[in-house]
Image: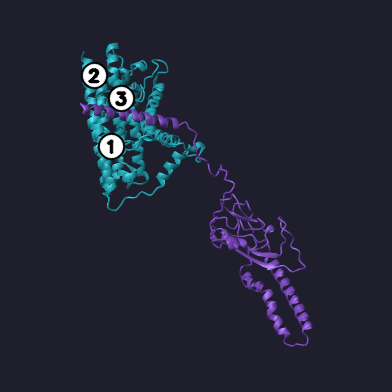
Chain colours: A purple, B cyan
Amino acid sequence: MSAVKGYFHNIWLALSTVAIGMKITFKHLFVPAVTVQYPDVKMKLPDRARNRLYVNIDDCIGCDQCAMACPVDCITIETVKSTPDQDLGTTSTGHKKRLHVSVFDIDIAKCCYCALCVYPCPTECIVMTDVYEFSEFDRKNLIYNYSIMTPHEIDAAREKLKKAEEEAAAKKAAAAAAKAAPAPSAQTLAAPMTGGAVGTPTKTEGSNAAQSPKPTTPAPDSSGQTGNS
Amino acid sequence: MDALDNLGVWGSVLVALVWSALPVVFILLYALVTLYMEMKVAAHMQDRLAYMRTGWHGTLQPFADILKLLQKEDTISQAADKKLFILAPYVVFIGTYAAFSAIPFSSIYIGSNIDLGAFFVVAVSSLVVVGILMGGWASNNKWSIFGAMRSAAQMVSYEIPTALAILIAVMITGSLNLQEVTKFQEGGIHNWLIFGGPLPLTQKLLLIPFTLVTFLILFIASLAEVNRTPFDLPEAESELVQGFNTEYSGMRFAMFYLAEYANMFLVSGVAVALFLGGWSSPFGSFLSGPVWGLFWFIGKGMVLVFLQIWIRWTLPRLRVDQLMYISWKVLTPFMFACIFGVGLILVL
Protein backbone atom coordinates (compact mmCIF):
# COMPACT_ATOMS: atom_id res chain seq x y z
CA MET A 1 0.00 0.00 0.00
CA SER A 2 2.74 2.41 0.93
CA ALA A 3 4.47 1.65 -2.37
CA VAL A 4 1.37 2.70 -4.28
CA LYS A 5 1.06 5.77 -2.11
CA GLY A 6 4.73 6.55 -2.72
CA TYR A 7 4.22 6.18 -6.46
CA PHE A 8 1.41 8.72 -6.61
CA HIS A 9 3.15 10.96 -4.11
CA ASN A 10 6.21 10.98 -6.36
CA ILE A 11 4.16 11.98 -9.37
CA TRP A 12 2.46 14.74 -7.40
CA LEU A 13 5.81 15.92 -6.09
CA ALA A 14 7.30 16.00 -9.58
CA LEU A 15 4.42 17.99 -11.06
CA SER A 16 4.14 20.44 -8.17
CA THR A 17 7.86 21.14 -7.99
CA VAL A 18 8.03 21.63 -11.76
CA ALA A 19 5.20 24.13 -11.39
CA ILE A 20 7.09 25.96 -8.64
CA GLY A 21 10.22 26.10 -10.79
CA MET A 22 8.31 27.34 -13.80
CA LYS A 23 6.65 30.02 -11.70
CA ILE A 24 10.06 31.28 -10.61
CA THR A 25 11.51 31.36 -14.11
CA PHE A 26 8.40 33.09 -15.43
CA LYS A 27 8.71 35.76 -12.76
CA HIS A 28 12.33 36.30 -13.71
CA LEU A 29 11.30 36.81 -17.33
CA PHE A 30 10.07 40.23 -16.23
CA VAL A 31 12.82 41.11 -13.78
CA PRO A 32 14.99 43.86 -15.28
CA ALA A 33 18.29 42.46 -16.51
CA VAL A 34 21.38 43.13 -14.44
CA THR A 35 23.56 43.31 -17.55
CA VAL A 36 25.66 46.45 -17.97
CA GLN A 37 26.13 47.18 -21.66
CA TYR A 38 29.84 47.59 -21.06
CA PRO A 39 31.44 49.55 -23.88
CA ASP A 40 28.41 51.83 -24.02
CA VAL A 41 27.71 52.01 -20.31
CA LYS A 42 30.47 51.84 -17.74
CA MET A 43 30.01 51.11 -14.11
CA LYS A 44 31.30 53.75 -11.73
CA LEU A 45 34.44 52.52 -10.06
CA PRO A 46 34.97 52.84 -6.31
CA ASP A 47 36.87 55.94 -5.18
CA ARG A 48 39.99 53.97 -4.31
CA ALA A 49 40.02 51.80 -7.43
CA ARG A 50 43.58 51.07 -8.52
CA ASN A 51 44.08 51.11 -12.26
CA ARG A 52 46.46 53.02 -14.49
CA LEU A 53 49.12 55.11 -12.79
CA TYR A 54 49.40 58.74 -13.65
CA VAL A 55 52.28 61.04 -12.84
CA ASN A 56 51.79 64.76 -12.68
CA ILE A 57 55.32 65.53 -13.78
CA ASP A 58 55.00 69.23 -12.90
CA ASP A 59 54.85 68.23 -9.24
CA CYS A 60 57.58 65.62 -9.35
CA ILE A 61 60.71 66.46 -7.41
CA GLY A 62 62.57 63.39 -8.61
CA CYS A 63 63.04 61.99 -5.10
CA ASP A 64 62.95 58.37 -6.38
CA GLN A 65 60.87 57.19 -3.41
CA CYS A 66 58.17 55.69 -5.62
CA ALA A 67 60.72 53.73 -7.63
CA MET A 68 62.21 52.38 -4.43
CA ALA A 69 58.82 51.40 -3.06
CA CYS A 70 57.84 49.54 -6.20
CA PRO A 71 57.94 45.78 -5.56
CA VAL A 72 58.24 44.92 -9.25
CA ASP A 73 60.64 47.73 -10.22
CA CYS A 74 58.44 49.10 -12.96
CA ILE A 75 59.35 52.74 -12.33
CA THR A 76 62.59 54.15 -13.73
CA ILE A 77 63.61 57.63 -12.69
CA GLU A 78 66.71 59.50 -13.71
CA THR A 79 67.50 63.00 -12.67
CA VAL A 80 69.97 65.77 -13.43
CA LYS A 81 70.86 68.18 -10.68
CA SER A 82 69.98 71.77 -11.25
CA THR A 83 72.64 74.42 -10.85
CA PRO A 84 72.32 76.99 -8.07
CA ASP A 85 71.50 79.78 -10.54
CA GLN A 86 68.49 77.84 -11.95
CA ASP A 87 65.03 78.10 -10.41
CA LEU A 88 62.88 75.08 -11.25
CA GLY A 89 59.97 76.49 -9.28
CA THR A 90 57.92 74.83 -6.58
CA THR A 91 55.35 72.07 -6.68
CA SER A 92 51.69 72.65 -5.94
CA THR A 93 52.37 71.28 -2.47
CA GLY A 94 55.06 73.90 -1.88
CA HIS A 95 58.13 71.72 -2.26
CA LYS A 96 61.07 73.29 -3.99
CA LYS A 97 62.18 71.43 -7.10
CA ARG A 98 65.91 70.87 -7.20
CA LEU A 99 66.29 68.16 -9.85
CA HIS A 100 65.54 67.95 -13.55
CA VAL A 101 63.53 64.75 -14.01
CA SER A 102 65.07 63.61 -17.24
CA VAL A 103 63.51 60.13 -17.28
CA PHE A 104 60.31 59.02 -15.58
CA ASP A 105 59.24 55.73 -17.15
CA ILE A 106 56.53 53.44 -15.86
CA ASP A 107 56.34 50.00 -17.42
CA ILE A 108 52.61 49.49 -16.86
CA ALA A 109 52.89 45.94 -18.18
CA LYS A 110 54.93 45.09 -15.08
CA CYS A 111 52.79 47.13 -12.71
CA CYS A 112 50.91 45.04 -10.15
CA TYR A 113 48.56 47.85 -9.12
CA CYS A 114 49.55 47.67 -5.47
CA ALA A 115 49.66 51.46 -5.13
CA LEU A 116 52.71 51.22 -2.86
CA CYS A 117 54.32 53.95 -4.96
CA VAL A 118 51.45 56.31 -4.28
CA TYR A 119 51.85 56.54 -0.49
CA PRO A 120 55.51 57.59 -0.16
CA CYS A 121 55.27 60.41 -2.71
CA PRO A 122 55.86 63.65 -0.78
CA THR A 123 54.12 65.80 -3.38
CA GLU A 124 51.29 63.37 -4.21
CA CYS A 125 52.16 63.56 -7.88
CA ILE A 126 51.89 59.83 -8.65
CA VAL A 127 48.30 58.65 -8.41
CA MET A 128 46.05 55.78 -9.38
CA THR A 129 43.36 56.72 -11.90
CA ASP A 130 40.15 54.99 -12.92
CA VAL A 131 41.35 54.32 -16.47
CA TYR A 132 41.48 50.61 -17.15
CA GLU A 133 41.25 50.39 -20.94
CA PHE A 134 44.82 50.64 -22.13
CA SER A 135 45.54 47.46 -24.01
CA GLU A 136 48.13 47.73 -26.75
CA PHE A 137 49.22 45.67 -29.72
CA ASP A 138 52.88 46.35 -29.00
CA ARG A 139 54.25 45.70 -25.55
CA LYS A 140 56.68 48.62 -25.92
CA ASN A 141 53.73 50.98 -25.96
CA LEU A 142 52.97 50.00 -22.39
CA ILE A 143 56.12 51.80 -21.20
CA TYR A 144 54.81 55.23 -20.37
CA ASN A 145 57.26 58.12 -20.55
CA TYR A 146 56.12 60.85 -18.24
CA SER A 147 59.17 63.10 -18.44
CA ILE A 148 58.49 66.21 -20.49
CA MET A 149 62.14 67.04 -21.10
CA THR A 150 63.38 66.74 -24.66
CA PRO A 151 66.78 65.07 -25.29
CA HIS A 152 68.09 68.47 -26.17
CA GLU A 153 66.96 69.93 -22.87
CA ILE A 154 68.47 67.02 -20.98
CA ASP A 155 71.78 67.49 -22.73
CA ALA A 156 71.67 71.20 -22.05
CA ALA A 157 70.94 70.62 -18.36
CA ARG A 158 73.72 68.09 -18.15
CA GLU A 159 76.17 70.42 -19.88
CA LYS A 160 75.21 73.19 -17.56
CA LEU A 161 75.66 70.96 -14.53
CA LYS A 162 78.99 69.78 -15.78
CA LYS A 163 80.13 73.33 -16.31
CA ALA A 164 78.87 74.39 -12.89
CA GLU A 165 80.58 71.43 -11.30
CA GLU A 166 83.80 72.19 -13.05
CA GLU A 167 83.55 75.78 -11.97
CA ALA A 168 82.78 74.76 -8.43
CA ALA A 169 85.64 72.27 -8.45
CA ALA A 170 87.95 74.86 -9.87
CA LYS A 171 86.82 77.37 -7.26
CA LYS A 172 87.28 74.87 -4.51
CA ALA A 173 90.62 73.86 -5.82
CA ALA A 174 91.61 77.48 -6.02
CA ALA A 175 90.36 78.08 -2.49
CA ALA A 176 92.17 75.03 -1.25
CA ALA A 177 95.25 76.06 -3.11
CA ALA A 178 95.00 79.52 -1.62
CA LYS A 179 94.43 78.08 1.82
CA ALA A 180 97.22 75.57 1.71
CA ALA A 181 99.54 77.38 -0.60
CA PRO A 182 102.65 76.33 1.22
CA ALA A 183 101.80 72.67 0.94
CA PRO A 184 102.13 71.54 -2.70
CA SER A 185 100.37 68.20 -2.20
CA ALA A 186 97.01 69.84 -1.25
CA GLN A 187 95.58 69.82 -4.82
CA THR A 188 95.81 66.08 -5.09
CA LEU A 189 94.00 65.78 -1.77
CA ALA A 190 91.12 68.01 -2.88
CA ALA A 191 90.31 66.10 -6.07
CA PRO A 192 88.80 62.98 -4.45
CA MET A 193 86.77 65.22 -2.15
CA THR A 194 84.99 66.94 -5.03
CA GLY A 195 84.50 63.67 -6.74
CA GLY A 196 82.66 62.35 -3.68
CA ALA A 197 80.38 65.38 -3.48
CA VAL A 198 79.10 65.19 -7.01
CA GLY A 199 79.61 61.50 -7.46
CA THR A 200 76.05 60.45 -8.27
CA PRO A 201 75.44 62.37 -11.51
CA THR A 202 78.37 60.68 -13.19
CA LYS A 203 76.74 57.34 -12.56
CA THR A 204 73.38 58.32 -14.05
CA GLU A 205 74.90 59.95 -17.06
CA GLY A 206 75.86 56.67 -18.62
CA SER A 207 72.36 55.16 -18.51
CA ASN A 208 70.79 58.48 -19.45
CA ALA A 209 72.46 58.39 -22.79
CA ALA A 210 71.03 54.98 -23.53
CA GLN A 211 67.41 55.80 -22.79
CA SER A 212 67.12 59.45 -23.59
CA PRO A 213 65.09 59.53 -26.84
CA LYS A 214 61.65 59.00 -25.32
CA PRO A 215 59.88 62.29 -25.44
CA THR A 216 56.16 61.59 -25.19
CA THR A 217 53.98 61.70 -22.12
CA PRO A 218 50.55 60.09 -21.72
CA ALA A 219 47.63 62.21 -20.69
CA PRO A 220 45.90 61.04 -17.51
CA ASP A 221 42.61 60.21 -19.21
CA SER A 222 43.70 59.29 -22.73
CA SER A 223 42.72 56.02 -24.32
CA GLY A 224 46.26 54.77 -24.02
CA GLN A 225 47.84 56.02 -27.24
CA THR A 226 51.21 56.62 -25.69
CA GLY A 227 54.77 55.62 -26.07
CA ASN A 228 57.34 56.10 -28.71
CA SER A 229 55.44 54.79 -31.68
CA MET B 1 -8.90 22.47 -55.87
CA ASP B 2 -11.08 22.68 -58.99
CA ALA B 3 -8.73 25.27 -60.44
CA LEU B 4 -5.94 22.72 -60.42
CA ASP B 5 -7.65 20.61 -63.07
CA ASN B 6 -7.41 23.33 -65.72
CA LEU B 7 -3.66 23.84 -65.44
CA GLY B 8 -2.36 20.98 -67.52
CA VAL B 9 0.49 18.70 -66.54
CA TRP B 10 3.28 21.25 -66.08
CA GLY B 11 1.01 23.71 -64.39
CA SER B 12 -0.10 21.19 -61.84
CA VAL B 13 3.50 20.05 -61.28
CA LEU B 14 4.46 23.67 -60.61
CA VAL B 15 1.52 24.14 -58.28
CA ALA B 16 2.41 20.91 -56.47
CA LEU B 17 6.01 22.09 -56.05
CA VAL B 18 4.95 25.47 -54.68
CA TRP B 19 2.34 23.79 -52.51
CA SER B 20 4.88 21.39 -51.05
CA ALA B 21 7.56 24.07 -50.63
CA LEU B 22 5.35 26.19 -48.38
CA PRO B 23 6.21 24.21 -45.22
CA VAL B 24 9.93 24.70 -45.93
CA VAL B 25 9.42 28.44 -46.17
CA PHE B 26 7.49 28.28 -42.94
CA ILE B 27 10.16 26.15 -41.22
CA LEU B 28 12.94 28.55 -42.24
CA LEU B 29 11.08 31.64 -41.06
CA TYR B 30 9.94 29.90 -37.91
CA ALA B 31 13.50 28.71 -37.16
CA LEU B 32 14.78 32.31 -37.38
CA VAL B 33 12.10 33.51 -34.99
CA THR B 34 12.56 30.61 -32.60
CA LEU B 35 16.35 30.90 -32.55
CA TYR B 36 15.93 34.49 -31.48
CA MET B 37 13.12 33.71 -29.06
CA GLU B 38 15.02 30.87 -27.43
CA MET B 39 18.06 33.01 -26.69
CA LYS B 40 16.04 35.98 -25.52
CA VAL B 41 13.78 33.92 -23.27
CA ALA B 42 16.82 32.09 -21.89
CA ALA B 43 18.60 35.34 -21.15
CA HIS B 44 15.67 37.14 -19.58
CA MET B 45 14.83 34.16 -17.41
CA GLN B 46 18.37 34.50 -16.07
CA ASP B 47 18.09 38.30 -15.75
CA ARG B 48 20.40 38.88 -18.69
CA LEU B 49 19.84 40.63 -22.02
CA ALA B 50 21.19 38.27 -24.71
CA TYR B 51 22.09 39.74 -28.10
CA MET B 52 22.09 43.53 -28.06
CA ARG B 53 24.61 44.55 -30.69
CA THR B 54 23.37 43.07 -33.97
CA GLY B 55 20.52 45.27 -35.01
CA TRP B 56 17.84 46.53 -32.67
CA HIS B 57 18.07 44.31 -29.58
CA GLY B 58 20.05 41.82 -31.63
CA THR B 59 17.26 41.04 -34.07
CA LEU B 60 19.76 40.34 -36.85
CA GLN B 61 21.63 37.74 -34.81
CA PRO B 62 19.79 34.69 -36.26
CA PHE B 63 20.82 35.83 -39.76
CA ALA B 64 24.41 36.22 -38.58
CA ASP B 65 24.30 32.74 -37.04
CA ILE B 66 23.02 31.22 -40.27
CA LEU B 67 25.59 33.11 -42.32
CA LYS B 68 28.29 31.76 -40.04
CA LEU B 69 27.04 28.19 -40.42
CA LEU B 70 26.92 28.58 -44.20
CA GLN B 71 30.51 29.74 -44.35
CA LYS B 72 31.94 27.09 -42.06
CA GLU B 73 34.21 24.40 -43.31
CA ASP B 74 32.43 21.11 -43.89
CA THR B 75 34.56 18.62 -42.04
CA ILE B 76 34.22 14.85 -42.26
CA SER B 77 36.56 12.89 -40.04
CA GLN B 78 38.73 10.29 -41.73
CA ALA B 79 37.42 7.36 -39.73
CA ALA B 80 33.80 8.28 -40.42
CA ASP B 81 31.55 6.22 -42.64
CA LYS B 82 31.29 8.91 -45.29
CA LYS B 83 28.12 7.80 -47.07
CA LEU B 84 26.05 7.46 -43.91
CA PHE B 85 27.64 10.54 -42.42
CA ILE B 86 26.54 12.64 -45.37
CA LEU B 87 23.13 11.03 -45.57
CA ALA B 88 22.17 11.33 -41.89
CA PRO B 89 21.24 15.04 -41.70
CA TYR B 90 19.04 14.70 -44.77
CA VAL B 91 17.24 11.69 -43.32
CA VAL B 92 16.56 13.60 -40.13
CA PHE B 93 15.30 16.65 -41.96
CA ILE B 94 13.25 14.65 -44.46
CA GLY B 95 11.61 12.75 -41.60
CA THR B 96 10.57 16.01 -40.01
CA TYR B 97 9.57 17.68 -43.24
CA ALA B 98 7.51 14.73 -44.43
CA ALA B 99 5.55 14.85 -41.20
CA PHE B 100 4.73 18.50 -41.90
CA SER B 101 2.78 17.42 -44.96
CA ALA B 102 -0.04 16.07 -42.81
CA ILE B 103 -0.26 19.10 -40.54
CA PRO B 104 -3.35 21.24 -41.19
CA PHE B 105 -2.04 24.80 -41.11
CA SER B 106 -5.34 26.28 -42.14
CA SER B 107 -8.75 25.19 -43.36
CA ILE B 108 -7.46 25.58 -46.93
CA TYR B 109 -3.85 24.56 -46.46
CA ILE B 110 -2.71 21.08 -45.64
CA GLY B 111 0.20 19.52 -47.50
CA SER B 112 -1.58 16.28 -48.12
CA ASN B 113 -5.11 15.72 -46.86
CA ILE B 114 -4.67 12.00 -46.19
CA ASP B 115 -7.06 9.96 -44.08
CA LEU B 116 -4.23 8.46 -42.07
CA GLY B 117 -2.83 11.88 -41.08
CA ALA B 118 -2.13 11.29 -37.40
CA PHE B 119 -0.78 7.82 -38.06
CA PHE B 120 1.40 9.14 -40.88
CA VAL B 121 2.92 11.80 -38.63
CA VAL B 122 3.79 9.26 -35.95
CA ALA B 123 5.16 6.80 -38.48
CA VAL B 124 7.22 9.15 -40.63
CA SER B 125 8.67 11.15 -37.78
CA SER B 126 10.24 7.89 -36.57
CA LEU B 127 12.59 8.34 -39.50
CA VAL B 128 14.28 10.96 -37.34
CA VAL B 129 15.48 8.19 -35.01
CA VAL B 130 17.01 6.37 -37.96
CA GLY B 131 18.79 9.53 -39.08
CA ILE B 132 20.14 10.27 -35.63
CA LEU B 133 21.33 6.71 -35.14
CA MET B 134 22.87 6.86 -38.60
CA GLY B 135 24.71 10.09 -37.84
CA GLY B 136 25.92 8.85 -34.46
CA TRP B 137 27.15 5.55 -35.86
CA ALA B 138 28.78 7.04 -38.94
CA SER B 139 30.70 9.62 -36.90
CA ASN B 140 32.81 6.82 -35.39
CA ASN B 141 33.03 8.75 -32.18
CA LYS B 142 32.16 7.52 -28.71
CA TRP B 143 30.19 10.62 -27.77
CA SER B 144 28.20 10.43 -30.95
CA ILE B 145 27.33 6.78 -30.60
CA PHE B 146 26.36 7.23 -26.95
CA GLY B 147 24.13 10.12 -27.91
CA ALA B 148 22.59 8.25 -30.79
CA MET B 149 21.89 5.16 -28.69
CA ARG B 150 20.35 7.22 -25.94
CA SER B 151 18.32 9.03 -28.51
CA ALA B 152 17.04 5.83 -30.06
CA ALA B 153 16.14 4.32 -26.68
CA GLN B 154 14.44 7.50 -25.61
CA MET B 155 12.48 8.13 -28.77
CA VAL B 156 11.30 4.56 -29.11
CA SER B 157 10.17 4.54 -25.47
CA TYR B 158 8.35 7.83 -25.68
CA GLU B 159 6.65 7.05 -28.94
CA ILE B 160 4.38 4.69 -27.04
CA PRO B 161 2.75 7.26 -24.73
CA THR B 162 2.65 9.71 -27.66
CA ALA B 163 0.88 7.24 -29.90
CA LEU B 164 -1.53 6.31 -27.10
CA ALA B 165 -2.29 9.97 -26.47
CA ILE B 166 -2.99 10.48 -30.16
CA LEU B 167 -5.22 7.41 -29.99
CA ILE B 168 -7.40 9.13 -27.37
CA ALA B 169 -8.07 12.01 -29.76
CA VAL B 170 -8.79 9.51 -32.52
CA MET B 171 -11.18 7.60 -30.27
CA ILE B 172 -13.19 10.74 -29.48
CA THR B 173 -13.25 12.22 -32.98
CA GLY B 174 -13.42 8.94 -34.87
CA SER B 175 -10.93 10.10 -37.51
CA LEU B 176 -7.20 9.92 -38.16
CA ASN B 177 -7.39 12.80 -40.62
CA LEU B 178 -6.00 15.81 -38.79
CA GLN B 179 -8.14 18.16 -40.90
CA GLU B 180 -11.24 16.23 -39.82
CA VAL B 181 -10.08 16.22 -36.20
CA THR B 182 -9.70 20.00 -36.37
CA LYS B 183 -13.10 20.49 -37.99
CA PHE B 184 -14.60 18.36 -35.22
CA GLN B 185 -13.39 20.91 -32.68
CA GLU B 186 -14.67 24.02 -34.45
CA GLY B 187 -16.97 26.42 -32.66
CA GLY B 188 -14.95 27.90 -29.83
CA ILE B 189 -12.61 27.09 -27.00
CA HIS B 190 -15.18 24.89 -25.20
CA ASN B 191 -15.22 22.52 -28.17
CA TRP B 192 -11.51 21.79 -28.05
CA LEU B 193 -10.67 18.20 -27.25
CA ILE B 194 -8.63 19.23 -24.23
CA PHE B 195 -12.00 20.34 -22.78
CA GLY B 196 -13.83 17.21 -23.83
CA GLY B 197 -14.81 18.17 -27.37
CA PRO B 198 -18.32 18.97 -28.69
CA LEU B 199 -20.02 16.04 -27.00
CA PRO B 200 -23.19 15.89 -24.87
CA LEU B 201 -22.63 17.67 -21.58
CA THR B 202 -22.43 14.67 -19.22
CA GLN B 203 -20.01 12.84 -21.50
CA LYS B 204 -17.99 16.02 -21.92
CA LEU B 205 -17.71 16.64 -18.19
CA LEU B 206 -16.66 13.06 -17.59
CA LEU B 207 -14.07 13.29 -20.38
CA ILE B 208 -12.41 16.51 -19.24
CA PRO B 209 -10.10 14.98 -16.56
CA PHE B 210 -9.00 12.29 -19.01
CA THR B 211 -8.32 14.68 -21.87
CA LEU B 212 -6.43 17.10 -19.63
CA VAL B 213 -4.17 14.30 -18.41
CA THR B 214 -3.80 13.04 -21.97
CA PHE B 215 -2.74 16.45 -23.22
CA LEU B 216 -0.22 16.78 -20.40
CA ILE B 217 1.21 13.34 -21.20
CA LEU B 218 1.30 14.12 -24.91
CA PHE B 219 3.20 17.30 -24.17
CA ILE B 220 5.70 15.59 -21.85
CA ALA B 221 6.24 12.73 -24.27
CA SER B 222 6.65 15.10 -27.20
CA LEU B 223 9.35 16.95 -25.26
CA ALA B 224 11.24 13.68 -25.08
CA GLU B 225 10.54 12.97 -28.75
CA VAL B 226 12.27 16.15 -29.83
CA ASN B 227 15.17 15.75 -27.37
CA ARG B 228 14.41 18.92 -25.48
CA THR B 229 15.41 19.57 -21.89
CA PRO B 230 14.69 17.93 -19.44
CA PHE B 231 14.94 15.00 -21.84
CA ASP B 232 17.97 16.20 -23.81
CA LEU B 233 20.12 13.20 -22.95
CA PRO B 234 21.05 12.55 -26.59
CA GLU B 235 22.72 15.95 -26.72
CA ALA B 236 23.70 16.30 -23.07
CA GLU B 237 26.40 18.88 -23.75
CA SER B 238 27.86 18.50 -20.25
CA GLU B 239 28.43 14.76 -20.68
CA LEU B 240 28.50 13.99 -24.40
CA VAL B 241 29.88 17.19 -25.94
CA GLN B 242 26.99 17.46 -28.42
CA GLY B 243 25.83 13.86 -28.66
CA PHE B 244 25.05 12.55 -32.11
CA ASN B 245 26.01 15.76 -33.93
CA THR B 246 29.42 16.22 -32.27
CA GLU B 247 31.33 15.56 -35.48
CA TYR B 248 29.12 17.66 -37.71
CA SER B 249 29.94 21.16 -38.80
CA GLY B 250 28.69 23.84 -41.12
CA MET B 251 25.59 23.14 -43.14
CA ARG B 252 25.25 19.53 -42.01
CA PHE B 253 25.11 20.68 -38.43
CA ALA B 254 22.66 23.36 -39.48
CA MET B 255 20.43 20.67 -40.98
CA PHE B 256 20.29 18.84 -37.65
CA TYR B 257 19.65 22.09 -35.91
CA LEU B 258 16.91 23.08 -38.30
CA ALA B 259 15.33 19.65 -38.01
CA GLU B 260 15.38 19.93 -34.24
CA TYR B 261 13.60 23.26 -34.32
CA ALA B 262 11.18 22.05 -36.98
CA ASN B 263 10.47 19.02 -34.80
CA MET B 264 9.60 21.33 -31.92
CA PHE B 265 6.91 22.92 -34.01
CA LEU B 266 5.83 19.59 -35.45
CA VAL B 267 5.00 18.06 -32.07
CA SER B 268 3.37 21.33 -31.01
CA GLY B 269 1.39 21.34 -34.26
CA VAL B 270 0.17 17.80 -33.67
CA ALA B 271 -0.80 18.64 -30.10
CA VAL B 272 -2.59 21.78 -31.31
CA ALA B 273 -4.43 19.97 -34.10
CA LEU B 274 -5.50 17.14 -31.82
CA PHE B 275 -6.31 18.87 -28.57
CA LEU B 276 -6.27 22.65 -28.95
CA GLY B 277 -8.64 23.07 -31.85
CA GLY B 278 -6.05 23.35 -34.63
CA TRP B 279 -6.75 26.35 -36.86
CA SER B 280 -10.20 26.99 -35.40
CA SER B 281 -10.70 30.25 -33.60
CA PRO B 282 -11.13 30.09 -29.82
CA PHE B 283 -14.08 32.52 -30.20
CA GLY B 284 -16.30 30.39 -32.40
CA SER B 285 -16.99 32.07 -35.73
CA PHE B 286 -15.40 35.33 -34.58
CA LEU B 287 -11.97 35.89 -36.22
CA SER B 288 -12.24 32.64 -38.12
CA GLY B 289 -11.44 32.03 -41.77
CA PRO B 290 -8.51 30.64 -43.74
CA VAL B 291 -6.05 33.43 -42.94
CA TRP B 292 -7.10 33.75 -39.33
CA GLY B 293 -6.93 29.97 -39.22
CA LEU B 294 -3.26 30.14 -40.17
CA PHE B 295 -2.75 32.76 -37.50
CA TRP B 296 -4.48 30.70 -34.84
CA PHE B 297 -2.65 27.53 -35.75
CA ILE B 298 0.80 29.13 -35.76
CA GLY B 299 -0.08 31.19 -32.69
CA LYS B 300 -1.13 28.16 -30.68
CA GLY B 301 1.89 26.25 -31.92
CA MET B 302 4.22 29.05 -30.89
CA VAL B 303 2.66 29.14 -27.42
CA LEU B 304 3.56 25.48 -27.03
CA VAL B 305 7.03 26.14 -28.44
CA PHE B 306 7.41 28.91 -25.88
CA LEU B 307 6.33 26.43 -23.22
CA GLN B 308 9.07 24.07 -24.40
CA ILE B 309 11.64 26.84 -24.19
CA TRP B 310 10.32 27.87 -20.80
CA ILE B 311 10.70 24.32 -19.50
CA ARG B 312 14.16 24.08 -20.99
CA TRP B 313 15.37 27.01 -18.94
CA THR B 314 13.67 25.79 -15.79
CA LEU B 315 14.45 22.12 -15.40
CA PRO B 316 17.74 20.25 -15.22
CA ARG B 317 18.37 17.12 -17.27
CA LEU B 318 17.01 13.75 -16.13
CA ARG B 319 19.11 10.69 -15.50
CA VAL B 320 18.77 7.79 -17.96
CA ASP B 321 16.98 5.53 -15.46
CA GLN B 322 14.63 8.37 -14.46
CA LEU B 323 13.86 8.92 -18.12
CA MET B 324 12.88 5.29 -18.60
CA TYR B 325 10.98 5.26 -15.30
CA ILE B 326 8.84 8.18 -16.45
CA SER B 327 8.08 6.62 -19.79
CA TRP B 328 7.36 3.04 -18.80
CA LYS B 329 6.14 3.32 -15.23
CA VAL B 330 4.28 6.61 -15.30
CA LEU B 331 3.23 7.85 -18.71
CA THR B 332 2.36 4.53 -20.34
CA PRO B 333 0.23 3.13 -17.43
CA PHE B 334 -1.54 6.48 -17.14
CA MET B 335 -2.25 6.43 -20.86
CA PHE B 336 -3.71 2.93 -20.64
CA ALA B 337 -5.91 4.07 -17.77
CA CYS B 338 -7.01 7.07 -19.85
CA ILE B 339 -7.79 4.90 -22.85
CA PHE B 340 -9.83 2.59 -20.65
CA GLY B 341 -11.68 5.50 -19.08
CA VAL B 342 -12.34 7.32 -22.36
CA GLY B 343 -13.45 4.09 -24.02
CA LEU B 344 -15.87 3.39 -21.22
CA ILE B 345 -17.34 6.89 -21.36
CA LEU B 346 -17.69 6.81 -25.13
CA VAL B 347 -19.41 3.41 -25.09
CA LEU B 348 -21.88 4.36 -22.37
Q: Is residue B266 visible?
A: yes
Left or right, A14 with respect to A183, comes to left
Residue at figure coordinates x 27%, y 33% from the top left: B125
Mark 3 surroundings: few (<14), some (14-19) or many (≥20) residues within 10 A: many
Compared with A159, A71 (above or below) is above
Whole-percent x, y for residue B274 in the image: 30, 23
Q: Earlier in the sequence, mark 1 or mark 2?
A: 1
Q: Earlier in the sequence, mark 3 or mark 2?
A: 3
Q: Residue B172 carries which label?
A: none
Whole-percent x, y for residue A85 in the image: 77, 68
Mark 1 surroundings: few (<14), some (14-19) or many (≥20) residues within 10 A: many
Left or right, A200 with respect to B162, comes to right
Looking at this view, is B178 or A204 the one in front?
A: A204
Tell me the kind of residue under disc 3. Answer: Phe
Specify whether disc 3 shares its chain with disc 2: yes
The residue labelled by disc 2 is B342
Specify whether disc 3 shares its chain with disc 1: yes
The residue labelled by disc 3 is B215
Whole-percent x, y for residue B34 in the image: 41, 34
